[in-house]
Image (spheres, grey):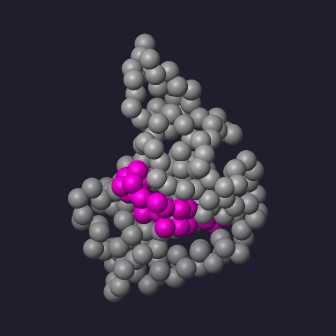
Amino acid sequence: MGACLSSPPQAAGRYSAPVYYPPPQTSGPGQQFVLFFPDKAMPCRSFLEGRPCRRRNCQYSHEMTSLCHFVFQLRQARQTISCCVYTITCREISEELVDAHRRGVQVRVVTEDEKMDDKGSKTMNLRSQGISVRKDGRGLMHHKFAVVDGRTVLNGSFNWTRSAVLNNRENVVISQDPNLARAFTAEFERLWRAFARNR
């Protein structure tokens, strides 16, 4: 076997500061924490999928990075994921949205129309997989948020791109505050209706 024999992430996880504050050890109404980027490396696919990595000298991360925490929040979805994002080029995030869709979660995306055809954009692939995508009209769709199951909000400066993961100083606040969840859900539904013709 290879020299890299990492263990898959556990529920509590292995944390490498400064990923978040305070530690996301519990969940429930009112809980919140923040993720900071950049990460030192992209996560190993095996590690992200909960499998041991058996590649020799694997160059990818085998720790609970900010991106891992972000992806795992999406993975908790059982009913809905509602996203308003400027652009999506991060493969790990787009694959998690597709996986959620395949297990029966309603995934909806509102995005910036000028970014849909950019090199590396995953938006058209999401659409081809059956995910509902709507583009904005005038002005920029500069939101970067998601609401999971109407309860958990992921919001911050973080663009859903590989460059943001590895190079940018970004943040994502993850909150289960009911008032915030209602506000972001209302904003998503307002935009979803407003862009009903922009498919």
Q: Is residue 23 left or right of residue 73?
A: right
Q: Find residue 89 and report its image quarter.
A: bottom left
Measuring from the top left, give residue 147's x and y in whole percent: 58, 65
Q: Which residues, given as a range, are shown in magenta?
A: 150-172
Which residue is painted at 60% across and 63% down in the image?
Answer: 173
Which residue is painted at 62% across and 41% down in the image?
Answer: 15
Q: Give the answer, above or below, for where 64 lies relative to 82.
A: above
Q: Nearer the viewer, residue 41 or 182?
A: 41
Q: Find residue 35 and report its image quarter.
A: bottom right
Measuring from the top left, give residue 166's x and y in whole percent: 40, 50
Which residue is painted at 59% across and 79% down in the image?
Answer: 186
For the C terminus, give its image quadrant.
Answer: bottom left
User: Can I make out residue 96 in this image?
Assistant: no
For the N terminus, give its image quadrant.
Answer: top left
Q: Give the answer, above or below, for where 188 lies relative to 57.
A: below
Measuring from the top left, give residue 64's x and y in whole percent: 57, 41
Point out the residue furthest to the top here: 1
Q: Nearer the viewer, residue 81 or 42?
A: 42
Say whether residue 57 is magenta.
Answer: no
Point out the residue furthest to the bottom here: 138
Which residue is painted at 47% across and 80% down in the image?
Answer: 191
Measuring from the top left, give residue 126's x and y in whole percent: 36, 57
User: Can I make out residue 199 in this image?
Assistant: yes
Q: Find residue 149 and report its image quarter.
A: bottom right
Q: How many marks?
A: 0
